Image: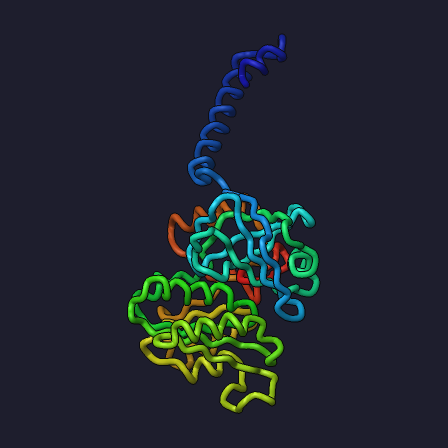
Amino acid sequence: MVDTVRRFADDKWDPALAVAWERGCRRALRLAERAADIVGHGPQVTVGEVECRDSVSDGVAVLTVRPVRRLRFLPGQALPVCTPRVPGVWRWLSPANAPRPDGTVEFHIRAVAGGAVSPVLVEQVALGERLWLGPTCDVGLSLEAAGSADLLLVAGGTGLAPLKALVEQVAAAPTGRRVTLVVGTRTLPDLYDAVALDKLASAHGDWLTVVVAFSDDRDVEPAAQGDALTLAIYHHRSSQAIYVCGPPQMIEAARQRLPLTGVAGDRLHLATTFDRAFDSAVWMSYQWAASRGPLPARDHAEGDGVEGSSGELACG
């Protein structure tokens, strides 16, 4: 760079200018090297093909995607997803499954009013279409944080996705822990994943208890009426670690209500939510934070699922 500037500067080039350019270029080089150390290999974006699409209820779809390169993720994590129909806009989603032998990933998606991506994924994306899948990110739902404790998993809406993945993780490596999964929904028709829940309860009934909370359905039995947090408090035992994932309002309510019932802070794990779109700068900041400790509590967003910059949640 210095040689190029010297060549075109002609008679304007002098020793002072040469020193200034030399110092400036070396400083830029040092900054670039530091940035490269932080970013490492950079965001790993891959392509996946929509292999199955189910419209499971009004405004909710389940997509099964087969990445061309196997995704590396842990149950409870989230990743940004983009469709070429809305290029450049990403929505944070949490896989609803533990890693599978065939590499496929299941996403639960609710069409959020005003969202740029979720309505397209739910209503327009067809079989065979391709999606872009970004690098995975911890959103506060890692099972490692619970140690060997029993689990109380509380899901609202499509916040069920990462918690269902945690149940599959427990099933894949039985440790003797007991799991209670509380699923909140408004009415029976809104319970979009009822068949999968029945299968889980039937397959793992010796250690898994599934509880459905209906917040606005007076036709179900009284014991099932109420919001998810209320029923979760009823089923809570002191030996349990609690994981909560759902809309932002639910996360905030859990943050306020559960400690008042005696839930210890180190046993309460709330889904992180995002209020901004995925880009390399955001990814780099998370990498930087991850190398120095947990994500800051103020970064929240997976509500019932998170959409680019519109404030939806990571799960779905």
User: In which image quadrant can residue 238 be found?
Assistant: bottom left
Q: Residue at x 59, y 57 (%)?
A: 52
The x and y percentages for residue 167 are 41, 67
* Above-or-below relation of 138 to 249: above
User: In which image quadrant can residue 309 be found?
Assistant: bottom right
User: In which image quadrant can residue 294 be found?
Assistant: bottom left
**Side of 254 relative to 308 (left or right):** left
Q: Residue at x 40, y 74 (%)?
A: 152
Q: How is the image coloured?
A: rainbow
Q: Residue at x 45, y 47 (%)?
A: 287
Residue projecting furthest to the top: 11
* Closer-to-camera residue (238/162): 162
Q: Residue at x 62, y 47 (%)?
A: 130
**Side of 95 relative to 209 (left or right):** right
Q: Does residue 301 appear in the picture of this structure?
A: no
- Figure disc tally: 0
The x and y percentages for residue 272 are 49, 62
Q: Does residue 188 appear in the picture of this structure?
A: yes
Q: Quadrant of the N terminus?
A: top right
